[in-house]
Image (cartoon, grey):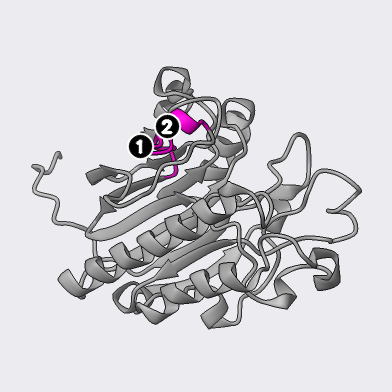
Amino acid sequence: MRVATWNVNSIRTRVGRVVDWLVREDVDVLAMQEIKCKPNQFPFDAFTEAGYEVELHGLSQWNGVAFASRLPMDEVTIGFPTAPGFSKVAAELADPPQEARSIGVTVQGVRLWSLYVPNGRELEDPHYDYKLRWLANLADETQKWITTNPSQPLALMGDFNIAPLDTDVWDITAFEGKTHVSAAERAAFEKFSEVGLIDALRSRGIEGYTYWDYQQLRFPRNEGMHIDFILGSKAFNDIVAGGHIDREERKGDAPSDHVPVVVDLEVEDEDDDRPMIF
């Protein structure tokens, strides 16, 4: 089973490119982030024609997460139970509204989450504190999931908006005093390792940037960041046969500023009890 994650940066803008890639690369399940649309705006038809079903969580023209799968998706879960909301509006601070940042599905017994971690914006911005609380609560939930069902393969996939190592950015000095590389963010990312998750690609020596800003010729100069990850439980890591970062998808017409991260899983097919047709 081939599974991937991709911050598509507006699915309505890039639906043709995403669907073409799914078919060309023989992907079974894709976790998407920043779909930037409500359910009634999602381009379902293009996915359906290619043989994919879609589950999504979208509330506005911002954020939004989804799965596209040509295999049955079960146990669809919108958000995790303790996810904090966010608002700068004083009247909403006691009970801030939720953002569309997480969705979970189970495919052939593998539990998958598509995550769009808050950006943080600036170190002094309220969004930074929100990011840290969001990550801390997700790590706590992840520990519970692993403890409750350690034999089930589990993966958190998506745009974490954190570069955990200095080598995950093109020039660490360019990030001094900025988000994505701060000690608190990196500690929050490390917490996922502490609760039992393993980077499916880095643990196999697969490295590379996953994001390049559109401005200042970042991509031609290879001034990128590694901020998109597939973090899996031991049960998930045990079935990973390989993986790669598809850098080529940053090229061409109207690309996303992120590229797909892909893993291949050795998963037994579910029994097919349909009658044989001769």
| Location of residue 20 with respect to 257 vertically, above or below | above
Describe the element under mark 2 as helix, strand or loop: helix
Question: Disc number at residue 95?
Answer: 1
Question: Disc number at residue 92?
Answer: 2
Residue type at the position of mark 2:
Glu
| 100 in magenta | yes
Tags 1 and 2 touching, CB below 8 Å:
yes
Answer yes or no: is residue 249 visible: yes
- Judge the density around disc 1: few (<14), some (14-19), many (≥20) Cα neighbours within 10 Å: few
Describe the element under mark 1 as helix, strand or loop: loop
Identify the residue at horizontal 42%, vertical 32% (top origin). 92
Residue 68, how many percent across, how many down? 41, 40
Residue 165, how many percent across, how many down? 66, 76
Q: Which of 64 and 210 is in front in this view?
A: 64
The C terminus sits in image quarter: top left
- Judge the density around disc 2: few (<14), some (14-19), many (≥20) Cα neighbours within 10 Å: few
| 48 in magenta | no
Residue ranking furthest to the front: 90
The N terminus sits in image quarter: bottom left
Q: Which of 79 and 45 is in front in this view?
A: 79
